[in-house]
Image (tube, rainbow, N blue to C red):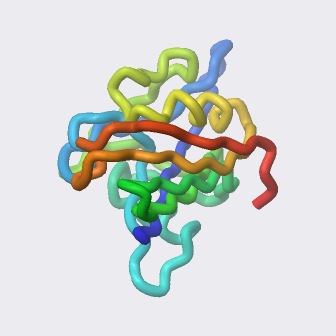
């Protein structure tokens, strides 16, 4: 099973609502869709280390503190495909910059473009952005690649301790 991470930097620039840093994927799995910075763990790397590295590589932010917000398991045709460790943070330095992999964009939490994201994101991401924790299992069918498979079912558990 692939081990991966997502990181959702949050900020409040003095207005009424928080903003989340999303990326538009420029290549690879989910190309053209929005998500948080993240990617696959490298050999010997912890999920936290991966989230920090991927956020730096994809958008140039130096994350200093991460809060684990979720653990999501994705099944494809009944087999384990990906386990994704989800983090959020308000502790980072730098300004987001585009890379070959990602175009970053600050988006109001109330305006997240769920219609341009994975089919399951609208089920768990709003809670994560509001400070909740979640464990989830999401079932897809239709074979590789995962981003072309059909989302068919899910289970969620909220207020999980990590």
Residue 36 lies in quadrant: top left
Q: Please tell me whether residue 146 is drawn above or below residue 111 in the rendered image.
A: below
Task: Tell me, yes or no, if residue 104 can be seen here.
Answer: no
- What residue is rendered at 45% in x and 64% in y? 80
Q: Quadrant of the C terminus?
A: bottom right
**Number of numbered discs present?**
0
Q: Please tell me whether residue 13 is drawn above or below residue 81 in the rendered image.
A: above
- What residue is rendered at 39% in x and 46% in y? 140
Q: Nearer the viewer, residue 24 or 53?
A: 24
Judge from the rendering whether residue 153 lies leftward or rightward of residue 128; answer left or right.
left
Judge from the rendering whether residue 31 lies leftward or rightward of residue 159; answer left or right.
left
Q: Nearer the viewer, residue 131 or 15?
A: 131
- What residue is rendered at 61% in x and 28% in y? 126
Q: Position of residue 40 (x, y in %)?
A: 39, 66
Judge from the rendering whether residue 146 lies leftward or rightward of residue 123; answer left or right.
left
Q: Position of residue 42 (x, y in %)?
A: 40, 77
Q: Position of residue 37 (x, y in %)?
A: 41, 49
Judge from the rendering whether residue 37 lies leftward or rightward of residue 68; answer left or right.
left
- What residue is rendered at 34% in x and 46% in y? 141
Q: Quadrant of the N terminus?
A: bottom left
Task: Tell me, yes or no, if residue 38 can be seen here.
Answer: yes
Residue sitting at the far bottom: 44
Q: Nearer the viewer, residue 151 or 107?
A: 151
């Amino acid at each position: 099973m692939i081990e991966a991470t997502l990181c959702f930097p949050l900020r409040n620039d003095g207005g009424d609502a928080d903003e989340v840093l999303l990326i538009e994927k420029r290549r690879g799995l989910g190309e053209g869709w929005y998500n948080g910075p993240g990617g696959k763990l490298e050999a010997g790397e912890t999920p936290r280390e991966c989230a920090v590295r991927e956020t730096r590589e994809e958008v140039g932010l130096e994350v200093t503190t991460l809060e684990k917000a979720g653990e999501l398991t994705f099944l494809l045709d009944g087999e384990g495909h990906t386990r994704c460790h989800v983090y959020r943070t308000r502790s980072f330095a730098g300004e987001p910059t585009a890379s070959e992999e990602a175009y970053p964009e600050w988006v109001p939490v109330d305006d997240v473009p769920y219609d341009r994201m994975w089919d399951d994101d609208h089920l768990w991401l709003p809670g994560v952005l509001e400070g909740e924790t979640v464990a989830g299992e999401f079932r897809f069918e239709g074979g590789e690649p995962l981003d072309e498979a059909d989302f068919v079912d899910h289970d969620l558990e909220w207020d999980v301790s990590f």
